[in-house]
Amino acid sequence: MRISMYTAIAVAAVSVTATVTLTKDGCVDASGFETCQSAVTKKTSACIGQAKKDGSQTELLACGCQDAVDNFNCYAAHCWNQVWGCQYQEYMVQYFRTCAIAKQPVPYFPAPNDAPAACSCNLGKIFLAFNGAIQESTQCSSKQNSGDASANVQAIQGCNCCQVSGAFSRYISCSKAILEQEGTRMRRVK
């Protein structure tokens, strides 16, 4: 049971396995969003072109990060009525997973508890709790350096136990979450 629960947490925490794209569906200002995204696409294309010209992998990665930032800013400005929903929250998880320099805070992430039109499970809070638990476990494990190997192993097992319970504690609050079979994406529950 422990392994299956841990797997469920991992799936929920990294539910963005495919590329998530922000769309105009349901946006309060769909045409403004499309115009904004068109400008972002041009800016990103120019950035990528320059990075390729310079032969710089670092510049290329920075172009990708900036593209994500520009896109979520377009969404926040023109689709503010959708920012608590699954699409935006999944997009933000993807941003944090793929952009090594991504930092908090970002607009509307994670969604507050009981936000209107929110995802059935707060993906942002699960993602941040999961990553926080991993970081704490890593720090805890790295401090186990006594001369007694057996004591170190036991202490590291304790660190791992805390990591799992830290991740579980946030996931358990998502009792209404439904994992869809295809793509294991969270969806809104009415």
Image (cartoon, grey):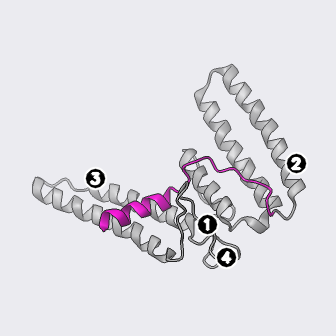
Please state the extent of the stretch shown in magenta in the rendering.
1-26
Query: Pointer 1: what residue?
Result: 187
Is residue 180 something one can see in this rendering?
yes
Q: Earlier in the sequence, mark 4 or mark 1?
A: 4
* Residue 103, image x, y percentages: 58, 53
* Alpha-carbon span between mark 2 and mark 3: 49 Å
Q: Nearer the viewer, residue 16 or 153?
A: 16
Circle 4 packing at 10 Å, graded few (<14), some (14-19), many (20+), is few
The amino acid sitting under disc 3 is: Ser
Instruction: Tell me the kind of residue under disc 4.
Output: Ala
The residue tagged 2 is 35
Q: Residue beneath label 3, please?
A: 142
Q: Is residue 70 magenta?
A: no
Q: Which residue is mark 4?
A: 115
Going from the N terminus, do you reach mark 2 or mark 3 first? 2
**Label 3 or label 4, whichever comes before in sequence order:** 4
> Relative to the observer, which residue lies in front, 108 or 79?
79
Describe the element under mark 4 as helix, strand or loop.
loop
Q: Which mark is residue 43?
A: none
